[in-house]
Image (spheres, rainbow, N blue to C red):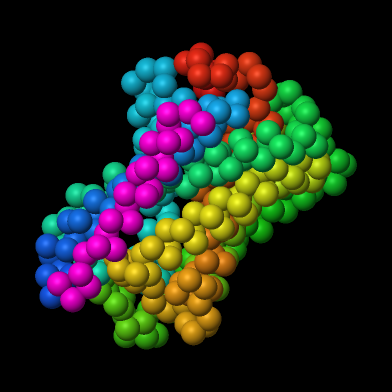
Amino acid sequence: MNRKIWIGLALVALSYAELLIPKDWAAINHFAAGFPYSGAVALFVFGVIFLGEGLAERFGAVPLLSLARGGFWRALRFAVIGAATGLILEIFGQWIGKLWFYAYYPTWFYWPSLVPSFLLYWVMIVESYIGAKAVLDHFIKRGGQEPADQPVGHYPFEPALYGTLGVAGGFVFIFCTIRALTSYFFNGGYTFNALTESSYGPPLVYIMLACVGLWAVAEALLYAAQKPSLLRSLLHGYFVPVLAVLVAAVVTSVVWESQNAMVDYWVYTHWPWPDLRVFNVQLSVLLSWPLHYLVLVSLPAAIVPAWAPAFFARPRPAAVSGRSKKTKHYD
């Protein structure tokens, strides 16, 4: 294992130090407890980022952070797209869906930390996916043999399929977003509240389908750009990207959510089956995690199609040369 993998594992292990904080003290001293809890979350996030980078380098994949290299504008594009994509989760999950709140955030901390927090969250999610994909690509050799910088082949039905996905996905996204927002007018009105529990949240199905619709639009855009995507990989017999989504979602969600369940740094509300739990985490929450990856991996690739091969194609030996810094740039 390379150094980044060891650093990542050490940071994730250190994040568990938050469990040493007495719960009785934290319950009384919310403001003070928020600082070490926030630090523990940061340790976990940076740990996963280091792991993703290390695994990509170790197994010859394209490290995510290489997409930010090559000049100021490249780095700025990476940061803006990552933050905007990460904020989609907060906007739909918290602002509209009221699916969680932050028990230890003071108001003055929430707003200044919002953009950098969700930029890092997006980086963590994509790094966990790329790391899982790099390992799976190393051991699963079937599929994905097309050159990474060329369009994948297509079946005769694909133009109609992706055209339908784009139109239907756009309609579902708009319809479900409007339905979720208008439901507040029939239930006492909308109140912004990210720091305490809200008495009402719109039906979960609207939030989930809105995200599925957004992913469908991203798939259509990637097809129009003749770039690989999650669905196209699956249709053409390259199963690794889909498996990487499942592996990354299961591992990341179980480890992170089970740790959080012991301290309740963020608290889930308005989820179905509250008594069905795995490692003290609601099963419905864990089942939703693959949807994070569908949106947070596919949408940035649709915005910058040149990133799609790094996300959905099998890496080539020329992409990364061992521990060398010679990394192929994706414009």
The picture quadrant where one finds residue 141 is: top right
Q: Quick check: 46 left or right of 113?
A: right
Q: Residue at x 77, y 27 (%)?
A: 146
* 10 sits left or right of 131 in the view: left
Look at the magenta stretch and give its main secondary structure.
helix
Residue 3 % position (x, y): 43, 29
- Which residue is painted at 73% across and 23% down in the image? 147
Q: Residue at x 53, y 55 (%)?
A: 251
Of residues 82 and 62, which is closer to you in this image? 62
Give the quarter of the image for residue 169: bottom right
Looking at the image, which is closer to me, 98 or 226?
98
Name above or below for residue 114 compared with residue 310: below
Q: Is the residue 20 above or below the residue 215 in the image?
A: below
Q: Seen in the image, is 303 located left or right of residue 237?
A: left
* Residue 245 forms part of the magenta stretch: no
Left or right: 233 in relation to 275: right
Residue 187 in view (yes/no): yes
Q: Is residue 5 magenta?
A: yes
Chain part drawn in magenta: 1-25
Q: Which residue is found at the position 41% from the left and 40% from the top?
A: 8
